[in-house]
Amino acid sequence: MKKSVIIIGAGFAGLSAAAFMAKAGWSVSVIEQNETAGGRARQLKEDGFSFDMGPSWYWMPDIFERFFNQFNKTVPRYYDLVRLNPSYRIYWQNEWRDIPADYNLLKEVFQQRLVAGSV
């Protein structure tokens, strides 16, 4: 008789656990409270606009590559990574600041904020 498991949550962790359990031969059911999978990495689409609901940065790409490789898949087969510049915008009460993608320019932004005394 095949073992079965219920995974609660279809975010990165839940989907990863479900994939590995299914690979090991388990019968897997995933329960998610939202209409779409992805957890913090899902998208909200409303009134013709799309909003990313989660991670701002794609840290540790090797983790994602290793995961996909466990299933004989590659990252580029499923999604394209596009470097955004600026990476994002930070808003304070009366001002905003673009955060550049370039590391050296980012260091300059932080240095300027430290010198100005408003971190």
Image: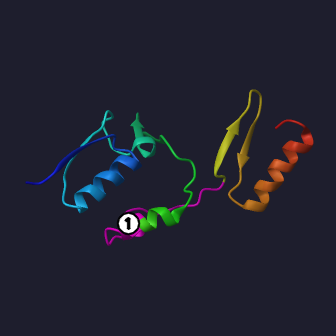
Residue 6 against residue 22 in the figure, above or below: above
Residue sitting at 11 percent across and 54 percent down? 2
Q: Which residue is mark 1?
A: 68
Q: Quadrant of the C terminus?
A: top right
Residue 88 lies, in percent from the top left, at 64, 47
* Colour setting: rainbow
Magenta extent: 67-85
> Around disc 1, counting alpha carbons within 10 Å, would you say few (fewer than 14), some (14 to 19), or many (20 or more)?
some
Q: Is residue 76 magenta?
A: yes
Dominant secondary structure of the residues highlighted in magenta in the image:
loop
Q: Quadrant of the N terminus?
A: bottom left
- What element does badge 1 sit on? helix
Residue 15 against residue 90 in the figure, above or below: below
Residue sitting at 34 percent across and 44 percent down? 10
Residue sitting at 56 percent across and 48 percent down? 56
Residue sitting at 51 percent across and 66 percent down? 62
Residue 49, located in which quarter of the rendered image? top left
